[in-house]
Amino acid sequence: MGQAASGGLTQGDVDEVIAASKGVFNQAEIESLYKRFRALDRGHKGYISPEEFLSIPELSINPVAQRLVRCCECPNFTTFVKMVAPFSPRASREDKLVFMFTVYDVDGDGFISREDMSMMLKQLAGSSLSEEDRQDIISRVLEQAGGAERLDFAAFKSALSSADLGNMVVEVPVDL
């Protein structure tokens, strides 16, 4: 596969992971992500356990951390990179929306239903919203999205057409 790049990745491995990330990460960023992945994979198993995943400080404080872990349980390095790729400043709006849709589609049926929205609102707002308030918010969202009882990806994308996704970014530190 070629000479080993930093930390045990061959150039072929790096090229493969760059392609899997749709080119949003360069070689230096892939190598930096690999170092982070190896540090998280405390048992050197080749994947990150849910507990290891939740040890990421930026993730552990996120109210939907458990949902993110369930979306991608025990990722290997390539899956890990695919999961963080939508947070690259070079990721497309479409890729960011696909990631968000996957997170909000709790039951994985290809639609964001009232139940999916209710579960996500519970995780995001905790006990600060009553069940009645949650249902009111969900009804307004669905009404604004055309009155359907659930959203497919096209409706989700349309509903977020004016949303600013500029803060959906995590910079990958690169050792120089």
Image (cartoon, grey):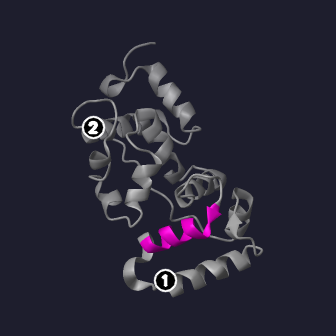
In percent of the image, x 49 and y 31: which residue is there?
A: 17
Residue situated in front as seen by the camera: 31 or 51: 51
First of labels 1, 2 by sequence position = 2
Is 54 within the magenta? no
Percent x, y for residue 113?
62, 65
Q: How crowded is mark 2: few (under 14 residues within 10 Å), some or many (20 or more)?
A: some
Q: Is mark 1 on a helix, strand or loop?
A: helix
Give, as a single range, the part of the protein colored magenta. Answer: 112-122
Q: Name the residue under label 1.
A: 131
Residue 13's quadrant in the figure? top left
Percent x, y for residue 96?
59, 55
Q: Mark 2 points at which residue?
A: 41
Residue 3's quadrant in the figure? top left
Instruction: Answer whether labels 1 and 2 touch (C-beta < 8 Å).
Output: no
Give the alpha-carbon distance from disc 1 to disc 2, as whole Å: 39 Å
Tell me which amino acid carries mark 2.
Asp
Query: Furthest residue to the left?
Result: 43
Residue situated in front as seen by the camera: 173 or 68: 68
In percent of the image, x 51 and y 61: which residue is there?
A: 168
